[in-house]
Image (cartoon, grey):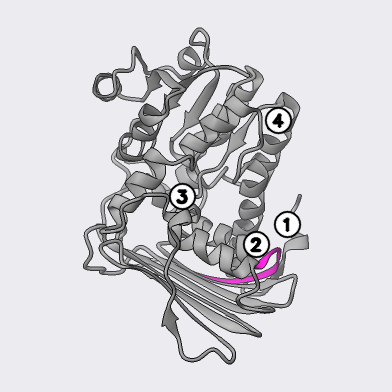
Amino acid sequence: MTSSVKVGVIGTSWWADAMFLPALAAHPAAEVVAVCGRHAGRARALAKRWSVPAAYTDTDTLLDHPGLDAVLILTPNRLHHPLTMAALERGLHVLCEKPLALNVRQAQEMVEAAKAAGVRHMVPFTYSFMPTARFIRELIGQGYLGEPRHLNMRYYAGGARNRDYRWRYDRGEAGSGTLGDLGSHFLFIAMQLFGEVVSVQCMLSQYGERDPRPDGKPYERVDEAAAISVEFANGAQGHVHVSKVCYEDTPFGQTHHMEFHGSEGTLYSHTDWDRVQQVSGARVGEGPVRSLEIPERIWQGARRDTAHNTYRDVFRQQDHMARGFITAILEGRPTSPDFADGLLVQRVLAAAEMAAREGRRVKLEEIGQ
């Protein structure tokens, strides 16, 4: 068992700065030794802000940094597969942002390469770590719903209301649009709670015009909203609706709404990404819907005055996501979610795109392993 983990970070976005580098800085055994980005000035600025000794613009140089143990790949989706494969060839542990790849074939190759390399690997489905999601998972695991019947999950955001070109709406860069960017989060949670998805129907939508690429090259636009209906192996039905063209007047410009129904009860969750992080429910014979207090063992001391303070504490002070990844490396134990989970989500994304394109229900068995 090693006493510290030397980490390289590829990607210099605001998300790397706000989510991952603070978490790594707070882990006593994580040592970020290098960052890498396309723009030298931005990479140097990020390295200076977080006291990282090296800043590169060449990914191979970062991956060959002396003594490197692990890498975080926080890049546009088209780079996930080649960078992950290059890291795995060097025997590095890898955390790769979601969605795992551009397609199922790439995701499968990443899973197989990680298994062959014998390293730790993670896909950070962020919202599955939040206290509301973990509490609901605990309640369902304890039988609160009885036999699962229905779920309805809605993620409303406004990131696509601005019509500027963004790589997330360019198929060559992202692989899929809001379906993969937001839908992957909620599809992962849905499968955590209700199990295997066996068939999918889907409607994908775009709204208005979007600006051309800055370099003038043509590109294929992908969806800005997705309505996904799923059938689970246990017979339950689910609907996941994700959109980036909604006006949500909250500090983070998004809201989450979840409903879960079963033979013995119902659970609701609402997060407004300001001051509301609520779980409520009702069980047969126990009276009307009431607020369910999230226990302290789940909060683990995290602030609960605002959702932003909660996620800052969950990811920077507790062993979840990036911090959990480091601890798993130290202790030599599996991570969760891992690349296999990322592949499961990738297959549902592929089925959803096929269903939208062909106007029919698609069985997951039609999607290559």
Give the class, few, some or many, for how many residues have Cα within 10 Å of label 1's Cα (few <14, many ≥20): some
- Tell me the CA gap for discs 3 and 2: 23 Å
The boundaries of the magenta stretch are: 194-205
| Mark sitting earlier along the chain (2/1) | 2
**What residue is at 31 percent from the left and 59 percent from the top?**
160
Q: Between residues 181 and 65, which one lies in front from this camera angle?
A: 65
Q: Which mark is residue 113?
A: 4
Q: Marks 2 and 1: CB-CB under 8 Å?
A: yes
Q: Marks 1 and 4: CB-CB under 8 Å?
A: no
Task: Give the residue pinned by disc 1.
Answer: 367
Three-letter code for the amino acid on which mark 3 is drawn: Thr
> Where is residue 151, by image quadrant?
bottom right
Q: Nearer the viewer, mark 3 or mark 2?
A: 3
Q: Is residue 303 above or below residue 121?
A: below
**What residue is at 61 percent from the left and 74 percent from the top?**
359
Question: Does the magenta portion include 77?
Answer: no
| Mark sitting earlier along the chain (1/4) | 4
> Where is residue 162, by image quadrant?
bottom left
- Tell me the CA gap for discs 1 and 3: 26 Å
Q: Nearer the viewer, mark 1 or mark 3?
A: 3
Does dot 2 land on a helix, a strand or a loop? Answer: helix
Q: Nearer the viewer, mark 2 or mark 4?
A: 4
Q: Marks 3 and 4: CB-CB under 8 Å?
A: no
**What residue is at 29 percent from the left and 23 percent from the top?**
50
